[in-house]
């Protein structure tokens, strides 16, 4: 970790704040402490709100959770909807969904990936990349992009619209839909709905390829700056399919060290607490997760598109896989380790999502009527999904009266907490240190944050760690007491 | 819409909400390009303007969960001729207000202190963090609100109808289909 987390003598320093961080979702601010020579001594990204979802969901019936959880986040409601539904599948013993149910859920999820990635790139970030990080404030927004690059803005709006329509058709509403239920879905597609989407999907694939190539061109035009900007090394975590393929809906956990070595692979996410723990810092409501085997100082990691594209062995759709290979090879692999490489990887994933939508629309299972399944009732459910911003974990315990008694969420942005702080500290060193602070320089800090596509609203709502001791006391009390005594951060099982 | 004359200033903010109303705002899709012929954005999560200036219309998503929300809301009321409560959270507190029956301290304790899965427990207390309110409040309890646009979220169609009515100088009306939810 860099040394800029805490200044030795903050009382002697000047404070500069970016408040609120804009063109991101939710509430965050950055504080920077500088001395008289503008040397940077401390940089922190604070998450300033606090909700309490995991507490107030307790006492609610389990089938309400997939409807309530999406209200954590209006950008990725489908991700919370599906992660909660997957957890509740376990509660009602639905070990394997019907083909129709799984494919409708996947369709919904790929629609979510597509609209979220399009929104983030075109509506929120493209002004920085197209106009430059120091461009004038008044122009740095989607309206400015529409004025100067009308085709790019229009394609962005229509790509997002298509993703939202996939969600509306599978979930009932564009935002906070209700298509997934414990054990399956409540609706398949009609032929008319399928044909409506099929009419546009090939245009969406073409525009998604254009978007990947646009980011590539931006990298080529700004090679040195983009590769160096906010660069840091991090361990990585994502789900992968059994054969190592990218799978955004389901898989096992793969962690890779910053040197590229596999730390664990195909780990069953139903026991995620064996590999992930969380830390608290006084200056943020968002917790700091870490890999238990490495401890809180060394075990922090990065999730999301950049991680997923590099961490999987291949992408199982042809256009996206070709782009993945070119991205990983670009400039001897340096772009794949760059913070701004997030944008490139995100567009590759958007292309993958549209390709998956196209394949699913050609699969008659999505027109089926076998929608729900169930089995032996269980007391605990864990649902994990690769949300647009990274690995999303939902974990619930449900009692014999069908009421939720415990809940824990670790959302994508929380996994990236330390990584985002590292990136902004690197940018502070690279661009601010020793200079008079200007609005343009401060925007550089925000450019680094935006690369992660943080969803600070999600992170706000999620209060973090499930009280594992309660679970383990029920099952294996001795393990708990050992964990509770650990104060040095070494949580080896 | 007819040919625009003078652009009105529009500001938006999200307080204790999920950003879904802002997403629904973007669900006006291509109408966005029509809208910007009529309005100019001021402070909004979609721009980098951090302080709200004199505006004609202010859209507020979310209720009030901390001191900073109250400050931003009052600032918007002061600067906006027309202030609109958009969505369930601004109008009645919404999902975040479900914490209201539980003492705040009990939630903070459970999350940051009593969970042994934590490496270092402790309730975040840095002066940079705004003080949480004991309960989540709807915005009309603190400022005068001119219009309430219901829904979780209001659909893109409802938002577009509301804005086009307002911009054309008509009293906004939403027919049954735009306020029928399930």
Image (cartoon, coloured by chain):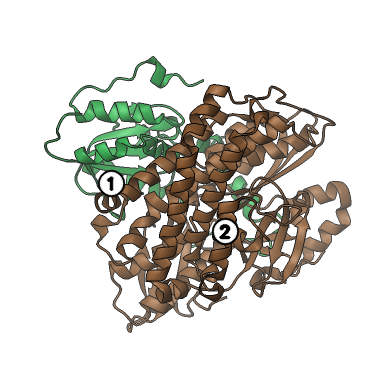
Chain colours: A brown, B green
Q: Position of residue A191 (x, y in %)?
A: 57, 23
User: Quick check: A408 left or right of B159?
Assistant: right
Q: Subunit of mark 2?
A: A
Q: Is residue A335 above or below residue A245?
A: below
Q: Which mark is residue B131?
A: none
Q: Residue under label 1, please give it.
A: B75
The crowding category of the residue bearing disc 1, from other C-alpha atoms within 10 Å (few below 14, some 14 to 19, many at least 20), is some
| Residue at the (47%, 52%) spot, across then down | A209
Instruction: Assign a secondary structure to mark 1.
Output: helix
Q: Is residue A244 among what the camera can see?
A: yes
User: Seen from this angle, which residue lies furthest top?
Assistant: B176
| Residue at the (49%, 80%) spot, across then down | A8
Q: Subunit of mark 1?
A: B
Q: Position of residue A222 (x, y in %)?
A: 38, 71
| Residue at the (39%, 15%) spot, across then down | B176
The crowding category of the residue bearing disc 2, from other C-alpha atoms within 10 Å (few below 14, some 14 to 19, many at least 20), is few
> Looking at the image, which is closer to me, A367 or A406?
A367
User: Quick check: B85 left or right of A351?
Assistant: left
Quadrant assignment for the N terminus of chain A: bottom right
> Looking at the image, which is closer to me, A207 or A302?
A207
Q: For the residues carrying marks 2 and 1, which lies nearer the camera in this image?
A: 2
Q: Is residue B6 above or below residue A348?
A: above
Q: Which mark is residue A322?
A: 2
Q: In terms of image quadrants, where is residue A359?
A: top right
Quadrant assignment for the C terminus of chain A: bottom right
Instruction: Assign a secondary structure to mark 2.
Output: helix
Q: In terms of image quadrants, where is residue A90?
A: top right
């Amino acid at each position: 970790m860099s040394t800029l987390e805490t200044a030795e003598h903050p009382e002697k320093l000047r404070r500069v704040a970016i408040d609120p961080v804009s063109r991101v979702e939710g509430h965050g601010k950055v504080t920077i402490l500088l001395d008289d020579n503008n040397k940077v001594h401390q940089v922190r990204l604070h998450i300033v709100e606090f909700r309490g979802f995991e507490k107030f969901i307790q006492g609610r019936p389990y089938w309400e959770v997939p409807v309530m959880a999406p209200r954590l986040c209006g950008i990725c409601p489908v991700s919370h909807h599906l992660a909660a539904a997957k957890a509740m599948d376990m509660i009602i013993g639905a070990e394997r969904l019907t083909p129709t149910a799984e494919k409708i859920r996947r369709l919904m999820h790929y629609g979510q990936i597509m609209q979220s990635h399009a929104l983030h790139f075109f509506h929120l970030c493209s002004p920085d990349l197209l106009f430059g990080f120091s461009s004038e404030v008044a122009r740095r927004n989607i309206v400015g992009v529409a004025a100067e690059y009308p085709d790019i803005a229009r394609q962005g709006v229509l790509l997002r619209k298509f993703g939202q329509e996939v969600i509306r058709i599978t979930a009932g509403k564009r935002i906070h839909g209700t298509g997934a239920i414990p054990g399956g879905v409540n609706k398949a597609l009609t032929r008319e709905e399928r044909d409506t989407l099929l009419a546009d999907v090939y245009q969406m694939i073409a525009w998604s390829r254009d978007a990947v190539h646009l980011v590539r061109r931006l990298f080529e035009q700004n090679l040195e700056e983009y590769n160096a900007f906010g660069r840091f090394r991090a361990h990585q975590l994502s789900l992968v399919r059994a054969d190592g393929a990218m799978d955004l809906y389901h898989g096992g956990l793969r962690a890779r060290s910053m040197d590229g070595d596999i730390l664990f692979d195909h780990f069953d996410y139903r026991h995620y607490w064996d590999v992930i723990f969380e830390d608290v810092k006084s200056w943020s409501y968002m917790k700091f997760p870490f890999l238990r085997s490495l401890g809180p100082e060394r075990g922090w990691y990065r999730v999301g598109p950049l991680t997923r594209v590099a961490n999987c062995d291949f992408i199982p759709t042809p256009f996206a896989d070709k782009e993945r290979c070119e991205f990983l090879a670009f400039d001897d692999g340096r772009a794949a380790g760059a913070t701004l490489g997030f944008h490139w990887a995100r567009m590759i994933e958007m292309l993958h999502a549209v390709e998956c939508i196209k394949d699913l629309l050609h699969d008659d299972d999505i027109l089926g009527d076998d929608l729900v399944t169930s089995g032996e009732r269980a007391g605990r459910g864990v649902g994990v999904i690769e949300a647009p911003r990274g690995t999303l974990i939902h974990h619930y315990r449900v009692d014999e009266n069908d009421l939720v008694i415990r809940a824990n969420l670790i959302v994508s942005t929380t996994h990236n907490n330390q990584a985002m702080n590292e990136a902004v500290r690197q940018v502070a060193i690279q661009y601010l240190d020793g200079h008079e602070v200007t609005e343009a320089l401060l925007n550089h800090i925000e450019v680094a944050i935006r690369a992660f596509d943080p969803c600070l609203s999600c992170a706000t709502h999620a209060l973090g760690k499930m009280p594992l001791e309660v679970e383990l006391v029920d099952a294996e009390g001795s393990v708990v007491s050992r964990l509770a005594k650990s104060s040095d951060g070494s949580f080896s099982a | 819409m007819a040919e625009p004359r003078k652009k009105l200033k529009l500001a938006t903010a999200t307080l204790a909400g999920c950003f879904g109303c802002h997403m629904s705002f973007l669900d006006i899709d291509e109408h966005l390009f029509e809208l910007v012929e009529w309005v100019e954005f001021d402070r909004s999560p979609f721009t980098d303007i951090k302080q709200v200036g004199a505006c004609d219309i202010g859209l507020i998503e979310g209720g009030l969960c901390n001191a900073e929300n109250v400050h931003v809301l009052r600032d918007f009321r002061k600067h906006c001729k027309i202030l609109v409560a958009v969505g369930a959270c601004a109008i009645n507190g919404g999902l975040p207000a479900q914490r209201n029956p539980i003492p705040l301290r009990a939630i903070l304790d459970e999350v940051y202190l009593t969970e042994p899965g934590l490496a270092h427990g402790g309730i975040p207390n840095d002066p940079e963090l705004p003080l949480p309110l004991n309960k989540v409040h709807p915005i009309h309890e603190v400022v005068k609100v001119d219009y309430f646009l219901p829904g979780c979220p209001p659909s893109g169609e409802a938002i577009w109808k509301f804005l086009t009515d307002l911009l054309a100088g008509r009293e906004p009306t939403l027919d049954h289909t735009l306020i029928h939810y399930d």
